[in-house]
Amino acid sequence: MSLSHDMIGQITPLSDRVLLKPVEADKITASGIIIPDSANKERPSLYEVISVGPGKIDKNGQQVTIDLVKWDRVISGQYSGDDVKVGDTTYKIVAFEYILAKIA
């Protein structure tokens, strides 16, 4: 099945999953040093939150909500989650526990 860009708003993650769009890493530092592509291969990646699931149900039957909203920027492991190709962009669906940090 092929998804088009106008369908991205129709994707709603389930449970504690989060839909992420990759943010292109800077290729030049503030001091003008050019960073080669090979330097960014094994690092956690920067993403923008597109959609957030309702949260997970804990052992007591209570829903644990996710404290992320659309457009938040987060860092997630490069190999965590599953890729979803929409048009020319590859999005990632990850469990909330694999998001390492939120960028304020």
Image (cartoon, helix red, strand yellow):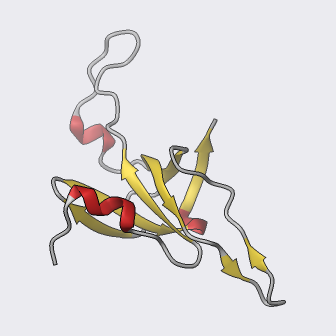
Residue 102 shown left or right of residue 40 in the figure: right
Residue 42 shown left or right of residue 97 in the figure: left
Residue 103 rendering spot, x and y as whole percentages: 59, 39
Residue at the (60%, 67%) spot, across then down: 97
> Would you say residue 50 is visible in this rendering?
yes
In this picture, is 35 found above or below 103?
A: above
Residue 65 shown left or right of residue 85 in the figure: right
Residue at the (40%, 47%) spot, across then down: 43
Looking at this rendering, what residue extends furthest in the top direction? 31
Q: Quadrant of residue 85?
A: bottom left
> Would you say residue 80 is visible in this rendering?
no
Residue at the (67%, 63%) spot, across then down: 66
Residue 4 vs residue 74, the one in the foreground: 4
Residue 8 vs residue 47, the one in the foreground: 8
Residue 34 vs residue 104, the one in the foreground: 104
Residue 59 rendering spot, x and y as whole percentages: 79, 90
Residue 58 rendering spot, x and y as whole percentages: 76, 84
